[in-house]
């Protein structure tokens, strides 16, 4: 598999190199020179999820890694359910929160961990990543206890739910967490600045587990196939898919799936008040504004890093950005969407509720669709209980951590402070 840097196309790397580097020069994203197209779609959609995923990822990676290695990576990463649940007559939720940290990020993080554990050759690797909520837990769980891999997670202090925070800040050992006195975009900027600093990048063998890492995105392609496979067991039509969107890795993976031949009618990019992309799709003006804190905090991103990949896929396939619907919901509308789902018999959480409502707003009367359920409702217990006036029980994964102490270090949104902390912590 060959990839190139979207900012510097002359920089070309293999998949193994891209996984280990994370980013290219000048914070450039790696993008494949060729998107494989699968011509046995009916056969693929009839397969079980794990077996199908081996074929999908093999189309990208078997030439470089060998199919046997691909099979091993998939077997070790994908070992939990992802049911498609009917929310009402026209909408289904693909529940992606049945993994160990109760969020869709488990798919990408676990696959990336397996890749690095199998492919990395350095004596020691430092994973530096930023989270707006769920990435932190998924990455921490996926890499926890692995030899010669240290993980540093940056997150916006006070701007993620307490239970989200507890899932990755209570582990210790090789998991180091930093509460940054700012928003997610500032955390993301600190990560990107670290990659441009040769002392950190080379001295600590730096890597990132955000969706900027291509291994994360390839893993996420697989569950879009599963969504359509389950949908087509009961429908002859192609679905519309609504994606809760923050850093836009989830939508990027869906577009890769469609480019490979997956029969999706179109995608809906669903956001909260941080509406950079919906405004851009409507007005054609890329104008990020200050990030606003919302109840759907994992989508509190004003400058989504993966958007250049979205545009690159659209260009490569000869599509139009107008094929993607952009919808932004206010806090009031989010509460109403959450309530509407619950009154119809489906308990959800704010991110999926936004996608569900965006789906309803963009579907034609003859259409049916899927929205992605990216987190367990209990991860947003306080919000869900306040909106719906109900009590939400905790699954075992949350019950285990709810009373544990948070081990994070507090830092300002200052690169010099972060650099000093990294070397003080990781050079011991």
Image (spheres, rainbow, N blue to C red):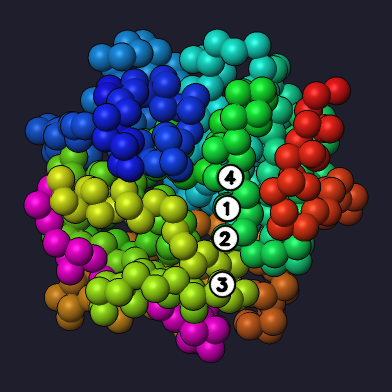
Q: CA distance from mark 4 to mark 2?
A: 12 Å
Q: Is residue 351 left or right of residue 248?
A: right
Neighbours of disc 2 within 10 Å: few (<14), some (14-19), many (20+): many
Label 2: element kind? helix
Neighbours of disc 4 within 10 Å: few (<14), some (14-19), many (20+): some
| Nearer-the-camera pick, 417 or 73 | 417
Q: CA distance from mark 3 to mark 1?
A: 13 Å
Is residue 98 in view? no
Are the residues tagged 4 and 1 within 8 Å (C-beta)?
yes
Q: CA distance from mark 3 to mark 2?
A: 8 Å
Residue 238 at what x, y percent from top left?
16, 58
| Rendered image quadrant of residue 364 | bottom left
Are the residues tagged 3 and 2 within 8 Å (C-beta)?
yes
Q: Is residue 319 left or right of residue 89?
A: left
Q: Residue at x 57, y 60 (%)?
A: 185
Is residue 294 in view? yes
Residue 32 drawn above or below residue 134: above
Kindly identify which numbered label has been placed on residue 189.
Answer: 1
Are the residues tagged 3 and 4 within 8 Å (C-beta)?
no
- Which segment did they paint magenta? 317-338
| Nearer-the-camera pick, 15 or 190 | 190
Q: CA distance from mark 3 to mark 4?
A: 19 Å
Q: Residue at x 38, y 30 (%)?
A: 50
Where, quadrant-wise, is the N terminus in this rendering? top left
Q: Is residue 73 left or right of residue 92?
A: right
Name the N-terminal-most of marks 3 and 2.
2
Q: Would you name the residue on which mark 3 appears? A: 291
Q: Would you name the residue on which mark 2 appears? A: 185
């Amino acid at each position: 598999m060959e990839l190139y840097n979207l900012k510097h196309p002359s920089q070309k790397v293999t998949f193994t190199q891209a996984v280990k580097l994370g980013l290219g020069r000048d914070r450039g994203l790696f993008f494949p020179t060729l998107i494989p197209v699968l011509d046995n779609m009916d056969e693929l959609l009839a397969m079980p999820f794990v077996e199908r995923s081996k074929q999908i990822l093999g189309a990208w990676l078997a030439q470089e890694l060998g199919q046997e290695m691909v099979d091993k990576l998939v077997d070790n990463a994908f070992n939990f359910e992802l049911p498609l649940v009917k929310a009402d007559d026209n909408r289904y939720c693909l529940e992606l929160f049945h993994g160990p940290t109760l969020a869709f990020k488990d798919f990408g993080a676990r696959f990336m961990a397996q890749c690095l554990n199998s492919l990395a050759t350095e004596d020691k690797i430092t994973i530096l990543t930023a989270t707006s909520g769920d990435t932190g837990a998924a990455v921490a769980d996926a890499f926890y206890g692995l030899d010669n891999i240290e993980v540093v997670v940056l997150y916006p202090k006070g701007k993620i739910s307490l239970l989200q925070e507890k899932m990755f800040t209570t582990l210790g050992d090789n998991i180091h967490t930093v509460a940054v006195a700012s928003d997610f975009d500032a955390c993301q900027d600190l990560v990107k600045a670290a990659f441009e600093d040769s002392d950190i990048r080379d001295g600590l063998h730096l890597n990132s587990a955000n969706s900027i890492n291509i291994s994360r995105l390839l893993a996420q392609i697989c569950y879009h196939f599963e969504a359509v496979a389950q949908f087509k067991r009961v429908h002859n039509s192609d679905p519309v898919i609504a994606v809760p969107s923050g850093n836009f890795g989830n939508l990027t993976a869906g577009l890769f799936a469609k480019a490979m031949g997956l029969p999706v009618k179109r995608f809906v990019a669903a956001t909260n008040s941080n509406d950079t992309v919906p405004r851009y799709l409507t007005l054609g003006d890329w104008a990020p504004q200050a990030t606003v804190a919302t109840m759907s905090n994992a989508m509190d991103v004003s400058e989504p890093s993966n958007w250049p990949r979205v545009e690159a896929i659209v260009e490569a396939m000869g599509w139009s950005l107008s094929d993607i619907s952009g919808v932004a919901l206010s806090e009031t509308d989010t509460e109403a969407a959450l309530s509407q789902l619950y009154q119809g018999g489906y308990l959800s959480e704010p991110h999926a509720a936004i996608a569900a409502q965006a789906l309803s707003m963009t579907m034609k009367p003859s259409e049916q669709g899927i929205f992605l359920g990216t987190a367990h409702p209990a991860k947003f217990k306080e919000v869900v209980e306040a909106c719906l006036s109900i009590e939400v029980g905790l699954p075992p994964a949350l019950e285990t951590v709810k009373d544990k102490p948070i081990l994070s270090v507090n830092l300002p949104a200052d690169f010099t402070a972060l650099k000093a902390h990294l070397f003080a912590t990781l050079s011991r």
